[in-house]
Structure formats: C-alpha cells, structure tokens
Amino acid sequence: MKFYTNVQVHGSKIHYIGIEDSKKVIRKINYKPTLYIKNNSNNIESVYKSVHGEKLSSLDFESIYEA
C-alpha cells in the first residue's frame, strides 16, 4: 500500500513523506512545472489539446517560483 502523510513545497523542491510497503519514505523531488496555453496559430501542429479540443502549447519553467 502507498499513501502520503505530508507534502510541502520548499524552495523549488517538493518534500514528500509517505508510507510505501509499510515503511516510512521521505523524498525531496525537484519540480519543474509546465503550463499549457491556448495556441491560436494555424501553421503550428500541436501535440496537446484541451478538453474542448483546442490546440495548446507548453511553457516549461525551471522552478515553481518562476512559474
């Protein structure tokens, strides 16, 4: 069984405390978020689509605070 007991953002990392296979697990995970925005350009093929079928482009950030 896997579940978390605490998750917090600290700097650009996510601190995760949880239980996995009946053992306590502590992890510090580097996190680089991605934001998806509507793409109105007709000449660019988009891999991503919204739930409404609209084309999306991705913006990658180096940290949580930059996003």
Image: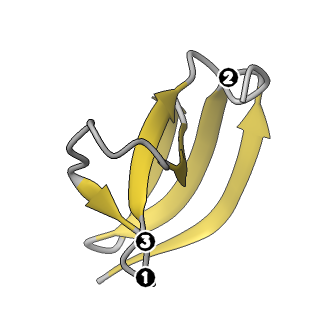
User: Which residue in the structure is indicated by mark 3?
Assistant: 50
Q: Position of residue 28 (x, y in %)?
A: 52, 31
Q: Which mark is residue 51?
A: 1
In this rendering, position of residue 9 left or right of residue 30:
right
- Residue at mark 2 to residue at mark 1: CA–CA distance: 29 Å
**As drawn, 23 above or below 62:** below
Q: Identify the residue shown where x is 75% and y is 48%.
A: 8
The type of residue carrying mark 1 is Val
User: Of discs 2 and 3, which sits in the foreground?
Assistant: 3
Between 41 and 54, the one nearer to me in the picture: 41
As drawn, which residue projects farthest toward the top? 62
Residue 30 shows in this picture: no
Q: Which mark is residue 12?
A: 2
Q: Identify the residue shown where x is 29% and y is 56%.
A: 48
Quadrant in the picture for residue 53: bottom left
Quadrant in the picture for residue 66: top right
**As drawn, 9 above or below 65:** below
The type of residue carrying mark 2 is Ser
